Amino acid sequence: MKKTVSRFVMTAAIAASMTTGAWAVQEAEADLGSVTGRITDSEKRVLPGASVIVEDLHTGVTTDINGYYKLPVLKPGTYTLKISYVGYAPITRKITVTDKKSQVNNFVMSEGHELKEIEVQGALSEQRRALQMQKSGMGLTNVVSADQAGKFPDSNIGDALKRISGINVQYDQGEARFGQVRGTSADLTSVTINGNRIPSAEGDTRNVQLDLIPSDMIQTIEVNKVVTSDMDGDAIGGEINLVTKNTPFHRVLNFMVGTGYSWISGKPQWNLGATWGQRFFDNKLGVMASASYQYAPGGSDNTEFEYDTDDDGVVLKEIQARQYYVTRERQSYSLALDYQFNPLNKISFKGIYNRRNDWENRFRVQYKDLDEDVQEITMETKAGADNTKDARLERQQTMDFTLDGQHYIGNLKIDWAASYSRATEERPNERYASIKYKDIDVASGLQDVGGRQPYTTVAIPSISDEGWEFDELTNQDEDIEENEYKARLNFELPLAKGRFGNKLKFGGKYTYKDKSKDVSFYEFDGEEMLGDWRKQVSYKIRDGFMPGNFYPINSPFISKEFLGGLQLYPQYGDEVYEEEAGNYDVKEQITAGYIRFDQKLGSKLDATIGLRVEHTSLKTNGFNYQAWEEAELDDAGQPVLDEDGEPQMQDRESLTPTGEYKHDYTNVLPSVLLKYRVNDDFNIRASFTETLSRPKYSALIANKTFNLADEEATIGDPNTEPTTSFNYDLSAEYYFKSIGLVSLGLFYKDIKNVNVETIGYYTGEELGLRGNTNEFEVEQNMNAYDARIFGVEVGYQRDFGFISPALKCLGFYGNYTYTHSTTRNYNERLGITDGDDVKMAGSPEHTANASLYFEKAGVNVRLSYNFASEFIDQMNTGARALDRYYDKVNYLDLNASYTWGRDTKFTVFAEAHNLLNQPLRYYQGEKDRTMQVEYYGVKVNAGFKINL
């Protein structure tokens, strides 16, 4: 803590000295003036990233996300300004600067000559703004507006991300949940809102759940594939920055209402949205408020398979058929405020709150012990209490609130921010009830073993069969929460103007995080609590089950309504420590400082050199769990014997705190970026950066969890090292006059200490159990290996007007990324030698997107395709034939809309998702060895928007 205070004192001292110097500069240059303003188009839309050049001085700036620019400290006189923007006619204007004055010059841009023959609106106008921001930036950034990538409000922000070059997404319940950038796992990419990394609502990952955030709450998505030193360093894959709606230039008022349908649930869904914005007090105060609500009944059809190895190779142990019914409700609210005291000083506030409720019921048929002589069938119901609709409620919430300011003192720019972020996940009264049928032969009816969908032809016995018995009844409560507090302070000082102008930027940031996971789990006597449970069954596994009609349709399960109505109080049950062994509390502090120097090397070449230092201080607390069997003793302390005269064994378990563990480390992260402008439309970029990725919290807990009876264990390690990477990038991009670009990029990453989730095998003695030579199956996240990734990105987007003017209404958007990964320097626990061909976990070799669109006279139609190849997801160190792979995906979506009206605009829209009924699929070792496959079906929606 003393070091942290010292750093802040030093930062404050530097800030004070720079401010004093700036005031001195201001006094010395008191006769100088400045020019500020805002760039908009004829429709009063702000133009972020516009280039504003003082041609006489060969210097200039770009407009910020709200379209504002500022040219400070100009000597009195007349200057020529040139304003340019993709797809707009350049503006050249003379301005006169007087002493001691800060004057405002706003500019309105009109369509360029290339676009005057067509009406530019909707996705096309948004695409133009996105391309300008991408073109003007120093780093390698892909920018996509919400309207451009996913216009309709039922899609979450992850669905929009999959359209970007080099991006792959992973799915849950048919919606994109996690994003992967450039062949790296989701753990290696940071997700930020307005530049702030936001916490995760889940306990076992730092990744942000993208399905929490509706796309209509986001103004722009920025994917920064190359980060500069003034950005957070934890971005090996890149940074996904979600920019919420900013304060408007003029009054904004729009509404949306929509509905949809999913064939699995057979129920309609509802979508509502509203946005209002206005400026007050002579445009000094800006306000923008947005709200979104989505209610979507759905579900999925799922089968899962468990394999093991023996002397004969890989054997099938278990088959599961699962029917999910999920109702998803999303709510999101945002507020943006800004107040401009004068052209040199303004403050702003941005806040966003997201909540997603998932009410889930699951009905699972489980065929166990398929590699044994006799088998067992289990029928399990997953539900919740009656106050959560008899369904398991998972409530995830995220929020981020930021207050920031921007001030100019002479030539010095100062910006600061303070923010609070929070993420939580609640699962109250998550209940499971199951019945089982033992000693039944289902293996004799196995079909398609070794194929993609093994099943058995043996029918499930009638519920009246006396072979059925109660199995288990449990109730779980889970609470996960993470709080983050951040403060930053930046200084930016131009040092020279002209063709060889430069500027210095430096600052610091402090982040404090506190995350905890708390699970309470109880098991109950089902026979006592349920009574005659045979009268409380319902029949599930629906007709039309998508994995195949050979699975047991209309099978008996404990009724969700009956299960939800039970009073499962802790005093009536037995606490199960094993399920609570993953509880933890983590505190993390990150103190960062940086320096950045931007140098112009003539009129065409720009260079940025930076250095960032991040110090991480970690404290963890968890629990050690151990389970074993011991002889049951009578009141006299003697062993109780069974009917065979053997000691009667009973289960024992213990849960003890690990105590507090600490781990500190410092990362020094250099960066060098070059940008060469061949001409106004052609950029070449090159860069070297170093970045890092911190391990997920659950891997950092110093716990060892043992189940001696099942010979299973889980290991955590607070000394797990962060993953670091040297990143090299070379890219070229050419921007067409008529909105569009073609780009080519090469990238190479040299990654150290890759963290990988593994399943391996240890003896009891290796785990610290003295004298225990049995082999345990161990789950562990470890620094598994070093890796290299080489990749190529190609992008193209353009209308077909270059073929014929009549084809300007048609266009194509496409990109392809090839990624090749290799690994080396393996952790000895993996049992891998350098000669083995092991790909980096989470790294698809091929990703591609293609979109064909038509836009004319208010009609917009888009057919979009997305592809990603398979990749290894989890390593099995004991049997590489059981490595887990995420299978390839092919998605096809269709969007259509029609907009009319001049001052008041009306839009009707329709959309069809997942036309190919692409399932989520994992396999083990071989492509035909299915581990899990889950189908979601086609979803459709339609609606109406009005923009007043």
Image (cartoon, grey):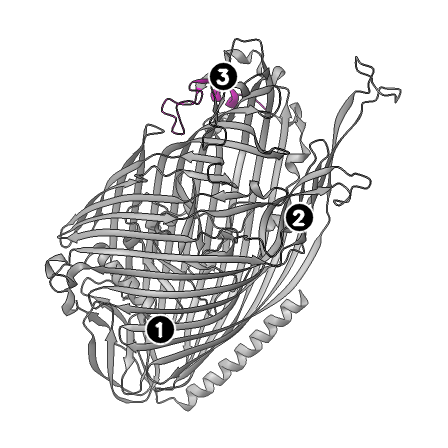
Q: Position of residue 219 (x, y in %)?
A: 33, 56
The answer for how far apart the CA atoms under marks 1 and 2 are is 45 Å
On residue 458, which mark appears? 3
Q: Earlier in the sequence, mark 2 or mark 3?
A: 3
Q: Position of residue 610 (x, y in %)?
A: 50, 75
Q: Which residue is mark 1?
A: 684
SS for dot 2? loop
Q: Nearer the viewer, residue 558 or 878?
A: 878
Magenta-colored stretch includes residue 818: no
Q: Position of residue 238 (x, y in %)?
A: 45, 60
SS for dot 1? strand
| 691 lies above or below 122 | below
On residue 637, which mark appears? none
**Is the stretch drawn in magenta largely helix, strand or loop?**
loop
The answer for how far apart the CA atoms under marks 2 and 3 are is 42 Å
- The amino acid on which the numbered mark 3 sits, given as a three-letter code, is Val
10 Å crowding of disc 2: few (<14), some (14-19), many (20+)? many
Q: Are marks 1 and 2 in contact (CB under 8 Å)?
A: no
Residue 248, quarter of the rendered image: bottom left
| 806 lies above or below 701 | below
10 Å crowding of disc 1: few (<14), some (14-19), many (20+)? some
Q: Are marks 2 and 3 in contact (CB under 8 Å)?
A: no
Residue 493, quarter of the rendered image: bottom left
Q: Position of residue 631 (x, y in %)?
A: 81, 24
Residue 453, quarter of the rendered image: top left
10 Å crowding of disc 3: few (<14), some (14-19), many (20+)? some
Magenta-colored stretch includes residue 544: yes
Q: Which residue is mark 2?
A: 716
Q: Earlier in the sequence, mark 3 or mark 1?
A: 3
